[in-house]
Amino acid sequence: MNSSIIGKIDKARRYAEEKDRVAITSLRSTFKGDHNQYDVSLDAGNWNCQCHFFSTRGVCSHIMALQRILEEMLTTQPEAVQAT
């Protein structure tokens, strides 16, 4: 193995340990739930899931699980400022 690829492998390991370097702003995934498989996506801070619960409530266990898995790397949206 040549030295340039060894350097890239070492750099990738370091980057992987420094999760704050990554901010996920969009994502497409397939989530295998207990009863079915669903397409779950994140685009510009907006989550979407094909499951029935999400379509009626705007949130679901599939999205909540992905948020937990990816919490360190998801881009946080600024909180709304309330007028006083």
Image (cartoon, rainbow, N blue to C red):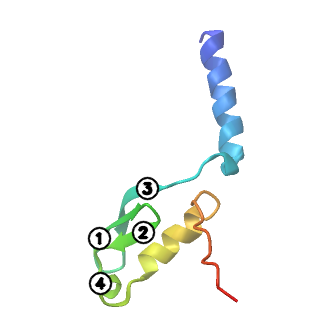
Query: What residue is disc 2 on?
Result: 46
Instruction: Give the residue type that dot 1 points to.
Output: Gln
Instruction: Give the residue type that dot 4 points to.
Output: Ser
Quarter of the image for residue 42 reads: bottom left
Instruction: Give the residue type that dot 3 points to.
Output: Ser
Left/right placement of residue 71 relative to residue 84 reads: left
Residue at image position (37%, 59%) is: 29
Residue contact between numbered discs 4 and 1, judged by CB atoms under 8 Å: no
Mark 2 neighbour density, 10 Å: few (under 14) some (14–19) many (20 or more): few
Screen quadrant of the N terminus: top right
Query: What residue is disc 4 on?
Result: 55
Q: In the structure shown, which secondary structural element does the residue marked by tag 1 occupy?
A: strand
Residue 78: image x %, image y %? Answer: 61, 69
Query: What residue is disc 1 on?
Result: 37
Left/right placement of residue 46 relative to residue 37 reads: right
How far is disc 4 from disc 2 in space, using C-alphas? 14 Å
In terms of sequence position, does the residue under pointer 1 or pointer 2 come before the other? 1
